[in-house]
């Protein structure tokens, strides 16, 4: 069971996420569905507090510019708060490993024993946790997020990378 955020954090949250279609593009229906789920899960519960910003709630517009992920953070009324560029390089290996183990997991659920499936799933969760910690480290001093929010954001980053997997 998740604890509610402390009173001073209940407004420090994301209430809307948009993706820049020019830099991220649209994908097939399956990937669009996964993106919608990732965004829904993120909005449903999160802690998101840009350093030095007045209390939220916030909206988040995500774009890719070059080899960087851009977080354009605004207040709910559209007033700009800050934009942060994060290099995608630290995530490339983790995302690649995550996709590989997810493929193994989906293959295993068809034929493998429950013990094998559980072992692969534990590995999958471990890689996801590594990506989440990496994201928290990259956001340190820029945006305060709890671990569960970092997990949800990492899921969204993975789904954005999935764009190239569909073609």
Image: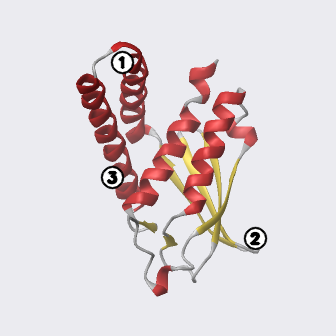
Q: Quadrant of residue 12?
A: bottom right
Q: Quadrant of residue 98?
A: top left
Relative to residue 38, is residue 81 depicted above or below?
below
The residue carrying pointer 1 sits among few (fewer than 14), some (14 to 19) or many (20 or more) residues within 10 Å by Cα, namely some
- Label 2 near label 3: C-beta < 8 Å? no
Q: Residue at x 27, y 19 (%)?
A: 113
Query: Most extreme residue toward the bottom, as rendered?
Result: 7
Q: Residue at x 57, y 46 (%)?
A: 38
Q: Nearer the viewer, mark 1 or mark 3?
A: 1
Horizontal arrangement in the rendering, residue 30 relative to residue 124 (left or right):
right
At mark 3, the secondary structure is helix
The residue carrying pointer 3 sits among few (fewer than 14), some (14 to 19) or many (20 or more) residues within 10 Å by Cα, namely some
Would you name the residue on which mark 3 appears? 133
At mark 2, the secondary structure is loop
Would you name the residue on which mark 2 appears? 78
Q: Quadrant of the C terminus?
A: top right
Question: What is the spatial separation of the Cα atoms under label 3 and label 2, in whole angstroms?
Answer: 29 Å
Residue 82, position as x, y percentages in the image: 60, 68
Horizontal arrangement in the rendering, residue 160 relative to residue 111 (left or right):
right
- Label 3 near label 1: C-beta < 8 Å? no
Would you name the residue on which mark 1 appears? 108
Question: What is the spatial separation of the Cα atoms under label 2 and label 1, in whole angstroms?
Answer: 46 Å
Say which label, 1 or 3, has the lower sequence index.
1
Residue 29, position as x, y percentages in the image: 72, 29
Residue 110, position as x, y percentages in the image: 41, 16
Relative to residue 43, is residue 103 depicted above or below?
above
Horizontal arrangement in the rendering, residue 83 relative to residue 9 (left or right):
right
């Amino acid at each position: 069971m998740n604890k509610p955020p402390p009173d001073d954090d209940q407004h420090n949250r994301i209430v809307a996420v948009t993706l820049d279609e020019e830099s991220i593009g649209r994908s097939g229906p399956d990937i669009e569905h996964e993106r919608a789920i990732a965004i829904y899960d993120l909005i449903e519960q999160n802690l998101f507090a840009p350093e030095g910003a007045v209390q939220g709630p916030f909206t988040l517009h995500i774009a890719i510019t070059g080899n960087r992920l851009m977080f354009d953070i605004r207040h709910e009324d559209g007033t700009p708060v800050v934009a942060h560029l994060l290099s995608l390089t630290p995530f490339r290996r983790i995302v690649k490993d995550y996709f590989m183990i997810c493929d193994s997991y989906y293959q295993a659920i068809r034929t493998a024993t429950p013990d094998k499936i559980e072992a692969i799933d534990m590995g999958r969760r471990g890689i996801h946790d590594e990506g989440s910690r990496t994201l928290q480290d990259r956001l340190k001093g820029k945006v305060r997020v709890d671990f569960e929010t970092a997990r949800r954001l990492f899921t969204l980053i993975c789904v954005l990378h999935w764009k190239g997997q569909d073609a």
